[in-house]
Image (cartoon, rainbow, N blue to C red):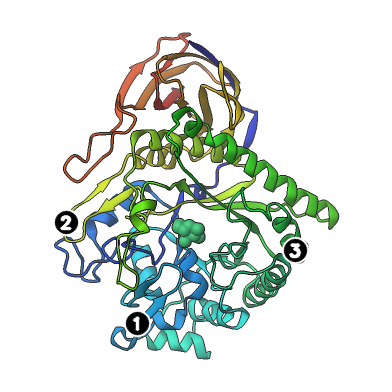
Amino acid sequence: MKARLHLEKDFVVGEVDKRLFSSFIEHLGRAVYGGIYEPGHPQADSHGFRRDVLQLVRELRVPLVRYPGGNFVSSFLWEDSVGPVEKRPRRLDLAWRSVESNAFGLNEFVAWSREAGVETMMALNLGTRGLDAASNLVEYCNHPGGSYWSDLRRSHGVAQPHNIRLWCLGNELDGSWQVGQKTPDEYGRLAYETAKAIKLFDPTLEVVAVGSSNRGMPTFPQWEATVLDHCYDKVDYLSLHEYYRNEPDDLPTFLANSVGMDRFIRSVVATCDFVQAKKRSTKPMYLSFDEWNVWFHSNAHDRKVEPWTEAPPLLEDVYTFEDALVVGTLLNTLIRHADRVKIACLAQLVNVIAPILSRTGGPAWRQTIYWPFLHASLYGRGTSLAVRVDVPTYDNKAFGDVPYLDVSAVLAPEGEALTVFAVNRHPTETLSIDLTAGGWGPFTTLEHLALHHDDPKATNTEASPDTVAPVRSLSALRAGELPRLSAGPLSWNVYRLGAG
Ligand code: AHR
C-alpha cells in the first residue's frame, strides 16, 4: 500500500507550545502516595520523593503538571495541606470516596516539581468553595511576604513565593459527578469574578476556564458558549477533557478515536470564535486540553474497591500496545492543532491512567503509552507544519472515512531537522510513503524509531517491562536521494530527517 505526503517549510500551522506535552497529578489512588511520594521506599530521597519515578518523569521532559485534581479539587480545602504535617487533618475525599491524610500537600508538590523540572498548573476549588478561598490561595502561593497569607507560607518554612503562573478555574463543573456542579450561568459568573480577582493580584497570571467534560455531554457546546459569554474577556484558555475506550473490543473503531478528538477541537474553536465575533473582540481564545488519555481497563476493578481507605489502587489501567497507537494518533491531532491548543495534559502521570507504573515498595517501569508520549515530547517541539496527505482510507461506522495513515510534522526550532510522526492503522499492510518537501536543501540523514508488537494486547509489566519498546535505525542519504519511509502494519513511527 502506498501513501504520499507533501509539506512545505513555509506552510506553518503554528508554533508548538512546549506545554502541549504536560501531564497531571491528582490526589487519587496511588498517584501521590506510592507514586511520586513514598517515604521509606529504598529509592526515596530525604523528602520522601521516589527517585526512580523522578528519573522517569525527567526523561519524559514534562514541562508542566496540573495539580491537585481533577474531581478531587472540587471539595478540597487547600489550607489542610499546608503547615506542620502532624497538625494536618485527615479528610474524606468525596470525589473518590477515599481518605486523604494530607501528609503530602501544596508545598511538598511545588518542591517535587522543582526536582522534576516542571512548572505547576494549579487547580482551584470552585465546587464547594469560591472566590475567597481561591484568592487566598493565590496570595499564599505568589505574594513575597508582608500580608496574612504570604506570611503564613513563610511561617511554614517557605520563604520564596512559588510564583505559579497558570491557574485552572475549577474542574468539570458541568458534570453531575462533580461535588458542587454548576449551571453554565452560575459557573460563568464565578469564573469571571475569580479570574478578575486573580488578575487584580497580578495581571500577568493566566487562567483556564472550564469547558465541557467531554464531547458527549448533553450541554456541549452550549456550556462553552454561555460560560464564555460571561468570562471571555478575563480568561486566557478554555479547557477540553476526553478519555477514549475500546469497548466493545473493536480495533478499527478504537484506532479512529483521534478523528473524534479532531472534531471536538474544531467544534470548540468554532464556539470560541462565535463568542469572539459576538463580543467584537480582537482576542483569540486558546485551548487547554488538560485531560486526555485512554481510560477503561480499570473500570470493573474500581467498582469493587472498598471506600474510605487511604491511597487505594484506583484507575490503574495497564496499557496495551494498541493503546499506545491510539495515544500516538491523539498526539498527532494535538500537534496538528498547535495554532489553538497551547496546553495539553496527558492524564495522568504515575499509577493513575499513567505512562509510569510503580509498585508500592517495589520498582517503577514504563507503560506502552510512555513511548509515543516521550517521542512527541522530545521531537515534537518546534513549528507544526501542514501536511498534504494522500492515503487510502477505511470506512468506519462511528467515524466515517478514516485514513490508514495518521500524520503530523514538526520542524525543529533550529530548522535543520524535520520530524514526521505517523501511525499506520492498517492491521496487515505495510505502507510505503513517498515524502516530498518544499523549501529544504536535500535531506542527509534519516533516523527511524518504530514501535510495534505482533500482539495488539501486549503490555509492559513489572516482570517484563520492555515487552513493548521502540527500535531505532539510522541511515545516511546520498545527494538527491529521496528518503524511503515505510510504516509496518499497526505501528507508531518517528522519522527524523536531517538537512544540510
Ligand atoms: O483523571 C481522572 C478524572 O477524570 C479526573 O479527576 C476528572 O477531572 C475526570 O473526570
Please identify, in this view, whether the residue under mark 1 or under mark 2 is nearer the observer. 1
Occupied quadrant, residue 219: bottom right
Query: Disc 3 marks which residue?
Result: 233
Q: Tag 2: residue type?
A: Gly
Q: Which residue is mark 1?
A: 90
In this rendering, is residue 3 above or below 424? Answer: above
* Mark carried by residue 80: none
Q: Earlier in the sequence, mark 1 or mark 3?
A: 1
Circles 1 and 3 in contact, beta carbons < 8 Å:
no
Q: Are marks 1 and 2 in contact (CB under 8 Å)?
A: no
Residue under the image location 39 percent in, 67 percent down: 27
Q: Disc 1 versus disc 3: distance between alpha carbons?
A: 39 Å
Q: Nearer the viewer, residue 102 or 389?
A: 102
Q: Amino acid at mark 1?
A: Arg
Q: Is residue 484 visible?
A: no
Q: SS class of the residue under badge 3?
A: helix
User: Alpha carbon of mark 1 to alpha carbon of mark 2: how far?
Assistant: 26 Å
In the image, residue 182 above or below residue 295: below
Q: Secondary structure at mark 2?
A: loop
Name the amino acid type tagged 3: Asp
Residue 399 picture quarter: top right
Residue 451 horizontal/vertical position (percent):
34, 29
Instruction: Looking at the picture, tell me which residue is in the foreground, 473 or 431.
Output: 431
* Residue 45: image location, x then y, percent: 21, 66
State the residue position of label 2.
362
Q: Which badge, 1 or 2, comes first in the chain's sequence?
A: 1
Tell me how far mark 3 sits from mark 2, CA to CA. 49 Å
Q: Where residue 43 appears, x then y in whole percent? A: 17, 60
Image position, residue 441 (x, y; %): 53, 18
Q: Residues within 10 Å of mark 2 (few under 14, many from 20)?
A: few
